[in-house]
Image: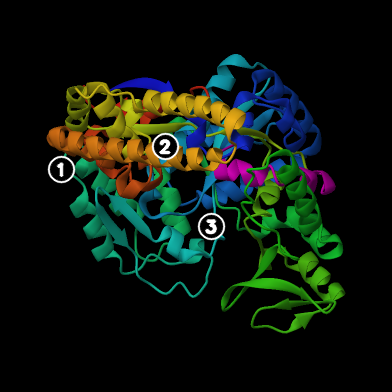
Amino acid sequence: MKSQIIQRETKLIGDELIEKFILGDKKVLKYINSFYSNENIKIQSENKSKSFSNEQREILVKSIKNQYSKIDISEQTSENINSLLDSKTFCITTGHQLNLFTGPLMVILKIAQVISISKKLNSEIKNFKYVPVLWIASEDHDFDEISEVNLGQKNIKWEINSNNKPVGEIEINNIKDLIGNYKDLIIDYDFKEKFEEIIDNSYKDGDSLSMSTIKFINYLFSDHGLIIIDANKKELKDFFKPQLKNEIEKFSCRENNSLQISKLRKDFESFKVQVNPSDINFFKLTDKGRKRVRYYNESFKVDDENSYSKDQILDLIGSSPELFSPNAIMRPLYQEVVLPNVCYVGGPNELRYWMQLKTYFDDNKVQFPILKLRNSAYVIDSKTSKKIKNSGIEIKYFIGELNELVNYKIEKTSSMKVNFDSLRSNLSLQFDELRKVSLETDKSFVGALNAQEKKQKKGIDDLEKKLIKAEKKNYEAEIKSMRSIHSYLNPSNISQERYLNFGNFYSCKGPSFINYIIEKISIMDDKILIIDLED
């Protein structure tokens, strides 16, 4: 394998907020604690050590060990779990949904990055230890979002009725056909048999989806000390009771989020709200699934249940916090209450909604973590690598829009050397001169001149389109190959890392694929990693 680094186009990310974040612009500082750096990680660690008690550490470690009690883990992971008892140990965390077979490639990239960051910090910062953590969204109930996986151009979907249960609680039963279909789509490379063994050992009848996901990811990353956490546990939610009560007594999430969103919109015109807060931002777990809690007429209504008075729901939180489940916008607060975490690694959309939360964290007296944008990567096989070389075009052009790629190819190689932009510019200058003459002689001609200019510019535009269309026919074979490359990197017009599962890459390279990503993924936020599987 080999790799190269290319520039990340901020325009592909989406908005000014993330662009300014990447650039370390001070305008962003009011929405975060500090930008990522070794010095700021040290400060964050010192502050977190004062607020995260030894009792919390003991309960957390006991919960994690219980979770792993029936799973074989590496010595490195075991050591990292035990090290959480030490007040000088902190987490570098990322999170994701419980997608089948990890879902899109970006899940592998995120996990690899928290491992890579932890290793780097441990080698550079003394007196503290950092462990990589994956927080699985086991309480999510949007089954459709996690029920499918894409390999090549094929899609596999798990068709069951989840009954609105938290996805982590869904049992892995009768999915042999689904697993068989997934295996059939994996290309028969050197490590296919090993990969199938990992699948069979992970997804077993009777296990929950949460447990199967933990097993699967543990097989892939345990040698690197990864700790996977399912926080849907009573002993962990006991820590979260003050924040749940604050939601009832002060509508803390709604009030603080609304204030932060208005400030973000004022400072960044292009800001798009990622998650809008509700009156109450947690669910109740019931026999009929995960149900919303709504505030109505001074009472708290749970879907399909009776209403609770304020005192009743506060008492229930106090006695049975495990019955309540934070929604997407409240989940980050729960994570930071449960973990001795100092840094969260996430994609652009994740960071946008984290930046909605700073005042919410402050109101609940919970330390806001340092945010780190996850790195992006593309993986190319040997066949595609050869196609790119033969095209004579740098790979960075294949990551953008297809039309821009085709136009670039034609502009670079075409024998048609007419500069249409220059023609339009010269035409504008000529009509500017005519307008000056018209204003000095007869102003009534200005309207006619403007209409004529518009007509002639349209004529140039039409001519350009026709010539480009004709030129495309001359390069039909090259353009077909370029489309194939573009489709490989952007399947279904979605970036590869957000769409394509890693299964075939693992079948090709095995554990060395995982190791290579961990080694290479820690790059600058404004860069993209390109991994070429060709030896």
Distance, label 3 to label 1, CA atoms, is 32 Å
Say what amino acid the circle numbered 3 marks.
Ser
- Residue displayed at 54% across by 20% down: 120
Say what amino acid the circle numbered 1 marks.
Asp
- Residue displayed at 58% across by 78% down: 287
- Indicate left or right for 325 with 256 as reference: left
Residue 510 in the image, given as x and y percentages of width and height: 27, 34
Quadrant where the image shows the N terminus: top left
Mark number displayed over residue 221: 2
- Residue displayed at 27% across by 62% down: 178
Whether residue 363 appears in magenta in the rendering, the answer is yes
Sequence order check, earlier mark of 3 and 1:
3
Q: Which residue is mark 1?
A: 188
- Indicate left or right for 335 with 465 as reference: right
The quarter of the picture where residue 389 lies is top left
- Indicate left or right for 201 with 123 as reference: left
Question: Considering depth in this image, is 31 or 241 the residue closer to the camera?
Answer: 31
Question: Considering depth in this image, is 351 or 244 the residue closer to the camera?
Answer: 351
Mark number displayed over residue 138: 3
Mark number displayed over residue 384: none
Crowding at mark 3 (Cα within 10 Å: few <14, some 14-19, many 20+): many
> Measured along the vertical axis of the image, is residue 55 above or below residue 168?
above
Per the image, label 2 sits on a secondary structure element best described as: helix
Say what amino acid the circle numbered 2 marks.
Phe
Whether residue 284 appears in magenta in the rendering, the answer is no
